[in-house]
Amino acid sequence: MKKYIYLLSAFGALVVLFFAFAPEDRILLVKTKYKRLVHDPGQLCFDYRAIALKDPKTAEMLEVSKTSGYLWVVYRAKNGFGAYSTDKFGCQLTKGEFTEFDQLLTSVSSRLHAGIEVSQKDFDILKKDTNSLSPSDLQEILGLERNFYHLIR
């Protein structure tokens, strides 16, 4: 029993030393991996949206806040001129959870209603796994797709 206590104490000391002396970027990497592991909605939203930034490798999440079905992420990243700037983006939450499917569905729907071009590829991605879709989601996708074809005629 004493052996396990010593082993646990040694492991705890290593963790404390790591966080005390590790560089800031290494600590951020550990925190990010942990948030992905536990499916943190803020981290998932950040990962989903950061891909579209000019330099996604420099993106860093600063703050996350929730407001009535929306998740707002404040981030810092290099802009097109190579300077760091701070901005925010939002992700819609469904039942308090972040899902890429809902983000794409919302994006396609809003682009259609705004008259912005939507590709067939977007609909193919949405319909890729129809077995896991609820009937209402499938109906919404098919309705959007019909509107899409009506608009391009």
Image: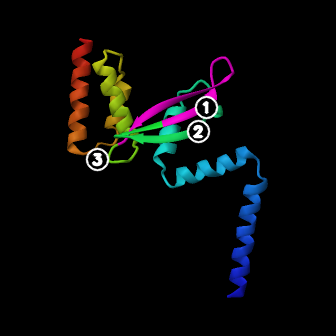
Give 128 or 67, whichever is nearer the viewer.
67
Hey, what amino acid is under mark 1? Answer: Arg
Query: Which residue corresponds to mark 3?
Result: 131
**Percent of width and height locating residue 43:** 52, 44
Front residue of 51 and 129 = 51
Q: x%, y% of residue 80? A: 63, 18
Q: Main secondary structure of the magenta part?
A: strand
* Residue 85 painted magenta: yes
Dot 3 falls on a residue whose secondary structure is: helix
Return the residue at label 1.
76
Q: Which badge, 1 or 2, comes first in the chain's sequence?
A: 2
**Helix, strand or loop under label 2:** strand
10 Å crowding of disc 2: few (<14), some (14-19), many (20+): few
**What is the quadrant of the C terminus in the image?**
top left
- Tell me what residue is drawn at x 69 percent, y 50 percent: 27
Q: Looking at this view, is 53 or 131 the one in front?
A: 53
Asked if the residue at tag 1 contacts the one at tag 3, i.e. Cβ–Cβ closer than 8 Å, the answer is: no
Q: Which residues are magenta?
A: 73-93
The residue singled out by tag 2 in the image is: 62
